[in-house]
Image (spheres, rainbow, N blue to C red):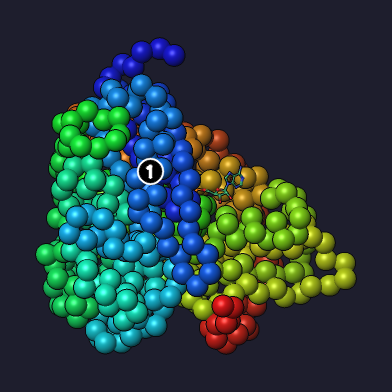
């Protein structure tokens, strides 16, 4: 391995299933070392992780990076959005974090929307209608179900804030991740004190929102990570905003991420406010906006169907009659938090491979149905859809997205776009550059473009029909526990 041309920076992605760390040469974008370690998420009614697992996983991922991590001049952390981290007076978790895909707060979501003036008011005020994923609904759920935990809480953080604070000793966040809480007003770019008062959350418990490009702090002395005391720490951001940075996308370029969550988004110059709630009006990590739609069921749901069928995830077969809505975790897009999976059109001659293809179709359909809503007038309708996340490596995912979108699809060769985006933020601290320009200089989006194929209108309209006909079944919910 040749010596680095520039200073080394570390970018971290602490996402739902694992924490990944990259050591990157800030001059060239070359990945000098990488590491990854898993965390566990509870199953059953809720989805929770002890935040200390993220720290341990970060430590292990950095250990795998070896000596290179010791040389880092700056570090930044991107992470799963929305999770509610509650800390006591010593900075220790009061209880495990409630994650973005925990739908127990669906009743609190409905109630908060109604109590504060309805969906349109929320969309105009915070950019988003707070579905059960949003932090504000989780805080309301906790206040109702575990008031002792709320009373013991001295600080409220998001997942990426938690790790940044353990590095720096400072409670900080950024506009991108703050915009997914439901208590950050997108018009004024400040915490919304009325919403906070409504849910009984003292603003003093929240982190300071660091400006894009500002240093969040420096690595403090006492920790078990390989960084030297005084290493610069950037503000970090939510994982989708980090991936947008990591790709260096300009406004209007559509991105689809296939991971634990499925997301579609584009950077926009216009502040979003979708009263239907399909599009979350997130801020990006620079000063623009990131209209985004997110599904709860993506790679894990399809892999689960493959496992139930005893098939490899690539063992799909074409078939036109069967429909599978893979809403194994409830769903957010469409907003059906109580839904479960639904199968329609099963026949004696339906094969396992056709059922598996139907699961891919169902997962991709929800994302594509929202794609048009996240793109504004800046968008070029013929631009390739950038496909990222673990699922983007899969041939069946790639083919399904091409067939149901009718668009060309570009699959960047770089695998860890969230961690690269965080690394670009860290590099920006050293050079004064815009992180998105850093990523473009690193050429992170480079990868093969798969040509457009004819859009499979028959499958799209069959899926739309089943979704509409099964509406009452899907909104009723299933008692499984
Ligand atoms: N080669 C592959 N083909 C299809 N799916 C894959 C492949 N590699 C990983 N995955 C899927 O990617 C998922 C993890 O993606 P990732 O984006 O890392 O998730 P997250 O960031 O949400 O934790 C796994 O659930 C797995 O199903
Ligand atoms: O809730 C959202 C976006 O609003 C999710 O995209 C989370 O940010 C989790 O991301 P992954 O772990 O799937 O990357």
Image spot of residue 404 (x, y percent): 61, 59
Q: Position of residue 416 (x, y in %)?
A: 44, 39
Residue 447, visible in the rendered structure: yes
Above or below 83: residue 257:
above
Determine the residue positioned at 74% across, 69% down. 322
Tell me the quarter of the image containing the C terminus: bottom right
Direction from residue 250 to residue 124 in the image, left or right: left
What residue sits right under mark 1 in the picture? 56
Res. 370 visible in picture: no
Which quadrant is home to the N terminus? Answer: top left
- Comparing 305 with 372, the one in front is 305
The residue depicted at 39 percent of the width and 76 percent of the height is 105
Q: Is residue 135 above or below residue 410?
A: below
Is 213 placed left or right of 356 in the picture? left
User: Taking 158 as reference, is 450 left or right?
Assistant: right
Looking at the image, which is closer to me, 76 or 246? 76
- Looking at the image, which residue sits at the far top? 2
């Amino acid at each position: 391995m040749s010596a680095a041309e520039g200073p080394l920076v570390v970018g971290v992605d602490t996402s739902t299933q694992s924490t990944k760390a990259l050591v990157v040469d800030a001059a060239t974008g070359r990945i000098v070392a990488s590491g990854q370690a898993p965390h566990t998420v509870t199953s059953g009614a809720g989805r929770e992780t002890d935040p200390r697992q993220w720290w341990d996983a970060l430590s292990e991922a950095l250990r795998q990076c070896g000596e290179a991590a010791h040389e880092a001049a700056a570090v930044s952390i991107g992470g799963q959005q929305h999770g509610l981290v509650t800390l006591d007076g010593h900075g220790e978790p009061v209880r495990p974090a409630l994650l973005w895909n925990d739908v127990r707060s669906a009743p609190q979501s409905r109630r908060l929307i109604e109590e504060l003036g309805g969906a349109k008011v929320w969309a105009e005020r915070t950019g988003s209608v707070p579905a059960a994923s949003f932090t504000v609904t989780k805080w309301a759920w906790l206040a109702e179900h575990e008031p002792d935990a709320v009373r013991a809480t001295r600080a409220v953080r998001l997942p990426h804030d938690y790790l940044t604070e353990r590095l720096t000793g400072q409670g900080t966040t950024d506009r991108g991740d703050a915009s997914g809480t439901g208590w950050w007003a997108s018009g004024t770019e400040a915490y919304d004190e009325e919403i906070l008062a409504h849910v009984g959350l003292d603003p003093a418990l929240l982190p300071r929102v660091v400006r894009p490009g500002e240093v969040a702090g420096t690595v403090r002395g006492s920790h078990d990570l390989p960084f030297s005391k005084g290493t610069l720490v950037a503000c970090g951001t939510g994982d989708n905003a980090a991936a947008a940075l990591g790709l260096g996308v300009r406004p209007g370029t559509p991105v689809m991420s296939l991971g634990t969550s499925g997301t579609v988004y584009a950077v926009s110059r216009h502040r979003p406010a979708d009263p239907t709630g399909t599009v979350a009006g997130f801020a990006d990590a620079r000063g623009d906006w990131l209209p985004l739609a997110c599904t709860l069921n993506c790679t894990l749901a399809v892999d689960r169907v493959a496992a139930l069928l005893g098939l490899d995830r690539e063992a799909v077969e074409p078939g036109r009659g069967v429909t599978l809505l893979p809403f194994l975790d409830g769903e957010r897009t469409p907003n059906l938090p109580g839904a479960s999976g639904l199968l329609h059109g099963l026949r004696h001659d339906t094969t396992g491979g056709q059922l598996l293809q139907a699961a891919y179709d169902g997962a991709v359909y929800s994302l594509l149905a929202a794609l048009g809503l996240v793109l504004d007038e800046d968008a070029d309708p013929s631009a390739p859809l950038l496909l990222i996340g673990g699922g983007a490596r899969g041939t069946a995912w790639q083919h399904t997205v091409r067939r149901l979108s009718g668009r060309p699809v570009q699959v960047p060769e770089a695998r860890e776009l969230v961690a690269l985006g965080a690394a670009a933020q860290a590099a920006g601290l050293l050079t004064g550059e815009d992180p998105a320009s850093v990523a473009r200089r690193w050429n992170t989006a480079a990868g093969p473009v798969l040509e457009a194929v004819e859009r499979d209108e028959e499958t799209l309209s069959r899926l739309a029909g089943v979704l509409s006909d099964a509406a009452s079944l899907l909104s009723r919910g299933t008692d499984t526990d």
